[in-house]
Image (cartoon, rainbow, N blue to C red):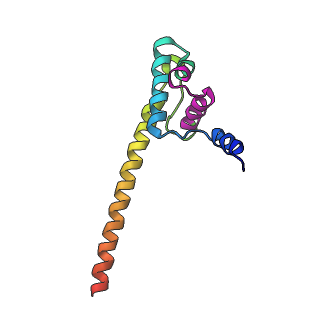
Amino acid sequence: MNKKSKSAAKSMRGRRYTLQEKAEVLDFVDRYNAENGRGGQTAATKKFQLSPLSISSWRKLAIRNGSISSYRPASGALPVGRALAQMQELHDRIVEQERTVVRLKAQFDALKASL
């Protein structure tokens, strides 16, 4: 693969966003829509320099996965960003607890082997 092909392939890859970043964007959209009635996605597209398709898919995914019990657009919009932030926090806590379990199992196995 020549240099031109490599750079073209590299530019085709999208940036990966953390749940925190997605939560920030979606929270901005929700606040903007609550204040102005509509236009939050367009404002977020300009402010965060994102594709409107990305924002739309994040919102749909959050709704579909049940992080929102019911979706109410415009002034009744639910804070999708907060739901994603809570999911990230829970995920971090789960990972921490899993590490603790692995460490405890290793201690248990060492004691068992010493018998």
Which quarter of the picture shows residue 56?
top right
Q: Is residue 52 shown in magenta?
A: yes
Judging depth in this view, the residue of 47 and 54 nearest the camera is 47
Tag count: 0
**Which residue lies most toward the bottom here?**
115
| Rendered position, 41 above or below 113 | above
Residue 29 in percent (x, y) is at 50, 23
> Which residue sits at x=27%, y=80%?
111
Residue 62, magenta (yes or no) = yes
Is 2 left, or right, of 21 in this rendering?
right
In depth, the one of 77 and 27 nearer the eye is 27
The boundaries of the magenta stretch are: 45-63
Q: Quadrant of the C terminus?
A: bottom left
In the image, 37 versus 20, the foreground residue is 20
Q: Is residue 57 left or right of residue 2?
A: left
Q: Is residue 108 left or right of residue 1?
A: left
Q: Residue at x 57, y 19 (%)?
A: 42
Residue at 34% of width from left, 64% of height from top? 101
Q: Position of residue 66 (x, y in %)?
A: 52, 40
Residue 31 against residue 67 in the figure, above or below: above
Q: Name the residue nearer the viewer: 26 or 44.
A: 44
Q: Main secondary structure of the magenta part?
A: helix
Query: Picture coordinates of residue 59 (x, y %)?
Result: 56, 32
Q: Position of residue 20 (x, y in %)?
A: 43, 37
Does 62 appear above or below 41? below
